[in-house]
Image: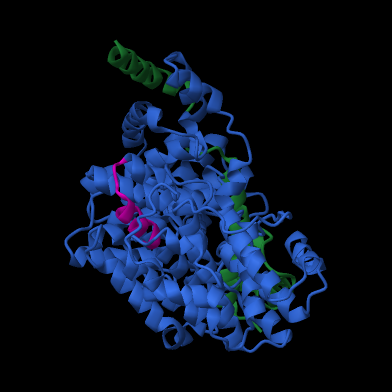
Chain colours: A blue, B green
Amino acid sequence: MAFVGDAGWGESFEPLAALREHFGFIPNLFQAQTAAPELIQAEVALLETVLLSSRRLTRIQKECILLTLAAVHGNGYCSAWHYQTLQLLGVPEDKLDKILEDHRAAGLQPVNTALLDFVLTISYDRAPAADEDVAALRASGLADDGTLEAVHVAALSDFLRTLADGLAVQPDFAAPGVQPLRKPRLREGKRTTLHLETAIPARLGGPLDALRSVLAGEAALRGYEKILVQLAVSLANNDANQASFCEGVLLSLHALPDANRLTETETALMDFGSTGRAEVLRQAGFGPAQMVEAVAAAAFAKLLNILYLGVGGGPPVELSGALQSLALRIASKKAHLLTPESRHINEIPDPDSECVAQIQAGKLDAFEELMNRHHRRVYRTLVGILGDPDEARDAMQDTFLKAFQHLDGFEGRSKFSTWLLSIASNAAIQRLRDRKPTESLDETGSDPEEVFRPRQLKAWDDNPEQLYSQTEMRRLIERGIMGLPAKYRVVLMLRDIEQLPVEEAAAAVALRIPAFKARLLRGRLMLREALAPHFVTKRSEGSAKGVPV
Amino acid sequence: LINCADFIAEIGNYLEGEVAEEIRASLEHHLKHCQTCTVLLDSTRKTLKIVTETGSFDLDAAEFAPVAQRIMSKIREGAK
C-alpha cells in the first residue's frame, strides 16, 4: 500500500499486540492505519466488544455473518479474512463454500439461516428491520438480545468493509473460490416496533463513544472535516437521522457548508463520503494520515447507518433545506455501490450515454436531441416544485444550460435523466427559496403522524372521465395539483404525473422511501378532496341515498 | 381488526398492490362493513386513474421549440 505510514510503533503498540493475540497475526487492515494510532485503539475496542467477547451468539456465528456480508458485497479483503478465520475455528471449507453459494441450501440450523437472512436484509437490502424479521428470529429460538448482537455484527461488517475498500488494503489470505450472487429484495416491511435500540448504549456505548470522540478531535484532519464526511455518507445512504445529527454538530461549530459555495477541500471530502472513492482525496492532495481519518469517518457513518436500520429505522426525520441542497448536490455524484436500488438501476444501460459522449466530444447538436427527449419530464418536475407554469418555462432554460455547463463532470454514475432531474429540482428549489420563504419543502406543516380526515364522502360517478372534455379535465387536474402545498405537489408530480419508480422519485427529492410514500398518500388524498365536487355522481347529489357521513 | 384510520394509511399501498396477504384480507374485511372507506377507496382509485391518464402538464414540442432554439444559440455562442 502506498501510504502505510510506519510510525515506529511496531508490535509494542498495545492495540496491535492485542490484535496479534486475538487473531494470531496483525491484519493488514490495521497495519494500514498506523498513521492514526488513536483510531486503531478505538477500533480494537470495538472489535473486542462486538466480535471477540461472547454473549448470545458464538464466534462462529458472528464470523459467518461477517463472511456472508463481505462476500455478498464483493469485498475481497474481508471475505478472505473471515473465510480464513472460520477455517481456523474448525469449519470445513466445503461447508463455507455452501454457505457462500446459498446459505438457505447449506443445511444450516434454522437459527443460523434466519440470522443470515436478517443481516442481509439490513446490510444488503438496506431495509429497516421489520416486525416479521424479528418474529422469524424468535421463532427460530433466538432471544432479542441475540438479534441485537447480530445488528452489531452487521454494523461492524460495514465498518470493516468501508475501511478495507477506502484504504485499498492488500488481502492477508487468498480469497475464497466461491462468489455469491444475490439480487436485492427491495421490500418495504413494516418497521419493527420492538425498540431494540434502548439496548444499544448499554452494549456498544463505550466503543462507539470512543470512536466518535477520536473522529471529532483535531488531528490530521479537522474535527468538522470528519463530520462532513459522515454527513455525506449519511445523505448518500438516505439516513436522514444521522445526517441531521451531523448537521447539528456542524451548526454548533459554525461549519455547516453551503451547497453552492463549497471549498475545494469540502468538495473532496463530500465527494469521497458520497461515492466511497478514496482516489478523490488523493487527487485533492490529501496525505496518508488524512486519508486514514477520512476513511474511518466514512466507516463510522456506515456503522451507525446499519445500527439504525437494524433496530427498525426509528421515526422518520425530515431533512432541513440546507441538507436537501447538499443531498441534491451529491445525488449526481453518488456511486452505484452505495445502495442496492441504484446498483439495480445501473444494470440497465443508459439510453442517453451515446448522446452524452458525443457532446463531451464537442458535437453540440447532440444536446438538442437530449433536450427533445427530456424536456417534458424536466418541465413537469419544475412545475411540480414551482407551482407556476410560466416560471417553470424560465427555469427550464436555467436547468438545461446548467446541465450543459456541467456535462463534462458527468461520469455516468447515475442515469443521465436522473442527473438532469436532480439539477432541475435543485434549480426549482432555489427559486422557491428566493421567491417565497414561506412555502418551503421541508416545513412539516401538519404533524405527519396525524390522521388525514376526508371530508368529501359522496360516491363518485362511475366514469368521471366522461363528465368533461379532455381540455376541461386537464384544467381541473392541473388546478387541483397546483392547489396542493409544495411538498405534496412535488411527490405527486414525480410519481403520478412523471410516473417515476418510487426509488428514483424518492431519491430525486432526497427522501427515504417510507417518508416519500407517506407524503404521496397525503397528496393523493388531498387531490381527491379537491376533485371530488366535480365528480360526485348526480344520483347521490342532494339525495338521501347519498353515502352516510 | 382495523379502523378507518388504519385503512386510510394503507390505501396507497393497497392500490399499488403492495400489501401483504393478511393485511389485504383485513382491509377487504373492513371494506365490507364500511361504506365511507368504500367510497374513499373508489374515488382515490379514480383520482389516480384520471391524474395518470389525462396528460396534464404536457409541454408540446411546438411550445418547447423556441426555448430549445434559445438554449442552443447560447450554447453555440459560448463555444465560440
Quarter of the image that includes the C terminus of chain A: bottom right
Q: Main secondary structure of the magenta part?
A: helix
Instruction: Please state if B30 lies on the left or on the right of A383 as rendered.
Output: right
Furthest-top residue in view?
Answer: B80
Which quarter of the figure has residue A403? top left
Residue A444 makes an appearance in the image: no
Name the foreground residue: A38 vs A99.
Answer: A38
- Counting from the top left corner in percent of width and height, residue A324 is at 34, 54
Q: Nearer the viewer, residue A252 or A427?
A: A252
- Direction left: furthest residue: A254
Classify A391 as above or below A148.
above
Q: Nearer the viewer, residue A94 or A538?
A: A94
Residue B3 point in image, percent of width and height:
60, 80
Q: Does the magenta portion include A49? A: no
Give the residue at x 48% y 56%. A527
**Count of numbered marks:** 0
The magenta segment? A284-296
Residue B17 vs A196, above or below: the answer is above
Q: Residue at point 58% right, 42% down?
A: A346
Residue A59 in the image: above or below residue B69? below
Q: Is residue A352 visible?
A: yes
- Image location (x, y in percent) of residue A518: 50, 64
Say which of A439 and A533 sits in front. A439
> Could you tell me which residue is drawn at 30 percent across and 54 percent down?
A290
Q: Residue A250: image x %, image y %?
A: 24, 63
